[in-house]
Amino acid sequence: MTVLPVSAPRVEPASLAAGLSAVLRRAGLSVSPERTAWLAESLRLVPPDSRDSLYRTCRTILVSARVQLPTFDAVFSAVFDGRLDPADTRGDPNAPPAVGSEARTRPTPPDSRPSAPHAVDSDRPPAPGGPTSDREGDDEEDSGPERDAVLAVASAEERLHDTAFAELSEDELTRMRRLVQNITIATPTRASRRHRPSAHSSARLDLRRTIRTAQRTGTDGTRLVYAHRRSRPRRLVLLCDVSGSMEPYTRVFLTLMQGAVVNAGAEAFVFSTRLTRLTRQLTVRDPDQALARAAATVVDWAGGTRLADSIRRFIDDYGRRGMARGAIVVILSDGWAQDDPEEVAAQMRRLRRLAHRIVWVNPRKVAAGFQPLVGGMAAALPYCDAFVSGHSYAALQDVAAAIGADRPYTAEMRRT
């Protein structure tokens, strides 16, 4: 079947974007639903008037690395030169692979559990002059001006900053975890009950020290002593969802938690069908070793999500004993829970009475047309002070900023 040009009246931009993305996935390129939606929206706003403009639009949105260009060019030529119809392979698992499917650029998705410490060494980048020389040769062969324009937007590391964790390969994920280690998390300060001497008369008068000073001089030449309250950082508590729906983000989030435990003295918990405390396992400075120890401890990894029950257990076993009182509580979850939304709201209400701030990190928030309508997410959101995505390295900077902010909770909080 011959594919009509995109300018034909009966070809919808959404159908074209979905069909082309499906063929590219079969050819080995990782095209996320977000990129497919961006392409459909671009074709709707600025309909291409020629095959060349259509090619440039699709290539700019769907291609994220130079090594993907040969496969993309082969698939695009097959589709729009009439040799392949994207609708022919849509939904048919027995259909033959698309043109260019022999060149795969993404490895097989990793197992749901992080690898053991001895297996992590294979993720390290190769030494100079190693296997990467073949790829460098491909780069030299594709050094035309049009191919250079694709990567003119950002360098490889800059691209990692804005790429969603779910779209990263295994090697890119390893590099991303090293970048996440450098994120500094600091909580706002609070006034302590202890006082220290102050030279400023605007501080509180310390009657006890003033009287002691007077006793030493026999009440002659009494000197007034002032004091002010000390300040200390608020406690940070992180609860991370490690259920199956959060699998693409779990390893990066655990690396962030490991850095918070080591550098900020945070408390770390994970939950799926049950709650598990991982503070002791994440105290080691080697992030790979910490991740392996966490994986060995959690027995419900990549299971279902019992959000309300996990929050209830945290409050009953740790929160009411002081861990959550006046603390910054960060929940990293997509809110897809098996619990009754009313029960989720009840437990979030209890947590709200204890915590100083609640920050909710939902990587699904960045998806086009996202609405917090899922039962657990909709029930929990009214009790949160901040709602951020945290789906990429740049988004994790927003998470750090939300943790460091010091805005009190109000009943009129916006649900955005």
Image: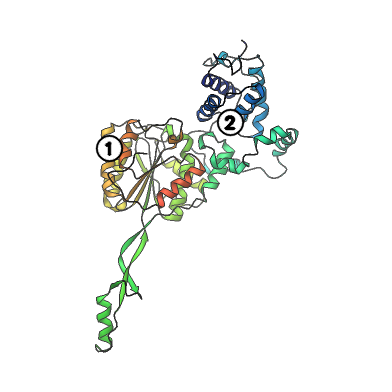
In the image, what residue type sits under mark 2? Ile
Question: Horizontal placement of 367 versus 84: left or right?
Answer: left
Residue sitting at x 44%, y 43%: 294
Residue sitting at x 27%, y 49%: 354
**Mark 2 or 1 closer to N-term?**
2
Q: Estimate the spatial distance between the alpha carbons at disc 2 and disc 1, rounded to whole Å.
A: 40 Å
Residue sitting at x 55%, y 36%: 168
Q: Quadrant of residue 382?
A: top left
Q: Residue 65 in the image: state x and y as whole percent.
A: 63, 34
16 or 85, which lies in front? 16
Q: Which residue is mark 2?
A: 61
Q: Element type at marker 2?
A: helix
Q: Residue 48 in the image: state x and y as whole percent.
A: 60, 23
Q: Quadrant of residue 341?
A: top left
Q: Residue 363 in the image: state x and y as whole percent.
A: 44, 37
Judge the density around disc 1: few (<14), some (14-19), many (≥20) Cα neighbours within 10 Å: many
In the image, what residue type sits under mark 1? Ala
Name the quadrant of the C terminus.
top left
302 or 48, which lies in front? 48
Q: Residue 360 in the image: state x and y as whole percent.
A: 38, 42
Number of numbered discs overlaid on the protein picture: 2
Q: Which mark is residue 345?
A: 1
Residue 312 seen anywhere in this rendered image of the structure: no
